[in-house]
Amino acid sequence: MRKIRIVLGLLALLVPGISAAVLAASPAQLAENVDTVYPDDLYLGKPDAKLTIIEYASLSCPHCANFNKEVLPKIKESYIDKGLVRWVFRDYPLNRPAFQAAILAHCASPMRFFSLVDALFNSQDYWLTQPQPLAALKQIGASLGIDEKTYDACLADEALKTRILTRVQEANSKYHVDATPTFVIRGKTESGEMSYDDFKKLIDAALGQS
């Protein structure tokens, strides 16, 4: 329960006007099914892959950025592209700039989501260190074809913000996520950046259970 309170505090900090419905959702309501994949989840791979892995990441997290750059491409080549793994990415923003970056990543066609995530991770050292990260994010968005007016509309989109923050609360109440990156594999959580070899062992063991 203490962790839920911590996350509720984070949600209120990120979005002071967040709806009471989101804050009032109970762990039982959020955790009815193990490793639920929602219709609006964005993922790499085939929907009927043998194994689904959920990644919770913050776009402001350097460990997440390094994993995205160094490890995920190898997993994609060895497992995702071969139809063995479906990789679900869920935002777990650790601070306001990360939340604003997550909104930017969703502020285009779902087909562009992962390319926007890559761009934001690759430019993390820039936008996260600026005195006004939001202005830097608007600059990056414009360079990627998302103009300021469009981004402002996304920042004001209550449905989008609620969806992101509801997943954050679920991550804490259902999977006890308290750090990024965290990965959910067959209902079990693995936290922290890992090498490809270590992650490969986890995937191979899980696939052996299929």
Image (tube, rainbow, N blue to C red):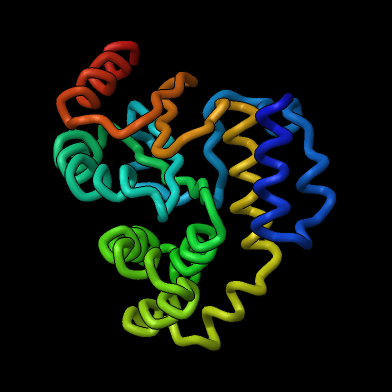
Residue 138 at x, y percent in the picture: 45, 80
Residue 69 at x, y percent in the picture: 21, 50
Q: Nearer the viewer, residue 157 or 133?
A: 133
- Using residue 169 as the reference point, say whether residue 75 is left or right of it: left
**Residue at point 82% right, 48% down?**
21
Residue 23 at x, y percent in the picture: 78, 44
Q: Nearer the viewer, residue 59 or 118?
A: 59
Can the viewer see residue 115?
A: no
Q: Quadrant of the C terminus?
A: top left
Q: Residue furthest front?
A: 131
- Using residue 75 as the reference point, say whether residue 102 is left or right of it: right
Answer above or below: position of 45 versus 158. Answer: above
Can the viewer see residue 196?
A: yes
**Residue at point 35% right, 31% down?**
192
**Residue at point 37% right, 83% down?**
145
Q: How many marks overall?
A: 0
- Using residue 124 as the reference point, say whether residue 16 is left or right of it: right
Q: Quadrant of the N terminus?
A: top right
- The answer to which quarter of the image holds residue 197 is top left
- The answer to which quarter of the image holds residue 53 is top left
**Residue at point 33% right, 45% down?**
64
Q: Nearer the viewer, residue 22 or 45?
A: 22
